[in-house]
Every structure is written in C-alpha cells, then in structure tokens.
Amino acid sequence: QVQLVESGGGLVQPGGSLRLSCVASGFTFSDYAMSWYRQAPGKEREWVASISSGDDNTYYPDSIQGRFTISRESAENTVYLHMDSLKPEDTAVYYCYAARGLLSRYWGQGTQVTVSS
C-alpha cells in the first residue's frame, strides 16, 4: 500500500523557519521525483518545489527561490522541505507528491503550516 505521510507543520511567527518531512512507503522511493505543493484556503493548489530521482536536481518557482530548500534521503525514504523567512502568505496545507512518468503519481494527506504573530 502506497503511503506518503507528511509531518512538521505547525504555527510559526513571520520570519521563522520550519522543516517539513514526508516519509514514503509502498513504492521504490529512489525511482520517483518528489515534490511539495501547497494549497491556501480559497486558492488552487500551487507547486512549491521538486527534486528529481537519480541526480537530485532541484527546482523551484520564482516566488519561492531562495527561501525554501527541498532535499531527499533515499536511505530513509524521506523528502524534506526546509522553509526559511516564512511569511503570512505561506500559510497553507502542504502536500507531498511522488511522480514517475505519467501514470504513477501519489499524494500525501497534507500538513498545515500557519504563519502568524
């Protein structure tokens, strides 16, 4: 059974940092590109970061570049999202996403991040 289990969300003050984790099981983690997405209330789901399989290249939208860092630890079947300089507009549910080709794609259940003073 495929599972992606996110953790690490919570309440943080503006300017603070958080590290999200996503533990994968039920598929060959090293074969999959891993990503983080987020969805704020009333908004569409938004891509946040990706890391490729094999060579671990990382990709970010311009709005995120420099503040968030995605990484993966294949020995632990885990992908991380380290978030710095958090802003209130980063408040959202953050989702882990695994993809291999066009047919094998999985989502986690999400973890809430709230940035507020």
Image (cartoon, rainbow, N blue to C red):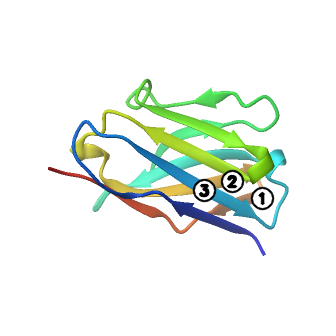
Image x and y of residue 6, in percent: 55, 61
Query: Which amino acid type is shown beneath numbered disc 1?
Result: Ser
Quadrant of the rendered image containing residue 10: bottom left
- Residue drawn at x 56%, y 53% is 21
Q: Which class describes the residues within 10 Å of circle 2: few (<14), some (14-19), or many (20+)?
A: many
For label 1, the residue is 104
- In depth, the one of 75 and 37 nearer the eye is 75
Image x and y of residue 17, in percent: 36, 40
* Numbered tag placed on residue 98 in the rendering: 2
Q: Choose the circle earlier in sequence order: 3 or 2.
A: 3
For label 3, the residue is 22
Secondary structure under tag 1 reads strand
Image x and y of residue 117, in percent: 14, 50
Task: Check if mark 1's residue and mark 2's residue have beta carbons within 8 Å.
Answer: yes
Secondary structure under tag 2 reads strand
Q: Residue furthest bottom?
A: 1
